[in-house]
Amino acid sequence: MRASALKLTGKNLDDDRVTFAAISDAMAALVERVRPDKAKYPTIYHFHCPMAHGDWLQLSDEPANPYYGFKMLNCGKLKGAR
């Protein structure tokens, strides 16, 4: 994940979206195997962006789509909560 995160440059958003999707997939797999401290993170929400074909994790149950910024901030489908 660290190597992927270092590739995020902000220069090419299409490339950054692909890299972010890979990081998000790795994080989702990690959270499935090793649940973070429930006292600090009571619920972790897993969302999907149909336009970017990518997922992300967040602590709020209202989508805050990281893929397209303010253009589609509220776009996203809840896949699950843990």
Image (tube, helix red, strand yellow):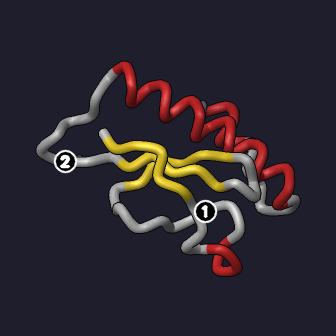
Q: Which residue is drawn at 54% across and 56% down?
A: 77
Q: Name the residue under label 2.
A: 42
What is the x, y in percent for residue 48?
58, 50
**Along the horizontal axis of the image, is 52 left or right of 63?**
right
What is the x, y in percent for residue 42?
19, 47
Is 42 drawn above or below residue 75 in the view shown? Answer: above
What is the x, y in percent for residue 38?
17, 40
Element marked by disc 2: loop
Quadrant showing the C terminus = top left
Is 27 drawn above or below residue 53 in the view shown? Answer: above
Element marked by disc 1: loop
Q: How packed is label 2: few (under 14 Cα within 10 Å), some, or many (20 or more)?
A: few
**Along the horizontal axis of the image, is 75 left or right of 52?**
left
**Along the horizontal axis of the image, is 67 left or right of 29?**
right
The Cα atoms of the two marked residues, 1 and 2, are separated by 21 Å
Q: Farthest residue in the top direction?
A: 33
Residue type indicated by callout 1: Pro
Residue type indicated by callout 2: Pro
Q: Please name whichever residue, 37 or 79, is drawn nearer the observer in this view of the structure.
A: 79
Q: Which residue is drawn at 59% across and 46% down?
A: 55
Q: Please name whichever residue, 11 or 25, is drawn nearer the observer in this view of the structure.
A: 25
What is the x, y in percent for residue 22?
68, 36
Q: Name the residue under label 1.
A: 66
Q: Residue at x 64, y 55 (%)?
A: 49
Q: Which residue is drawn at 55% across and 73% down?
A: 74
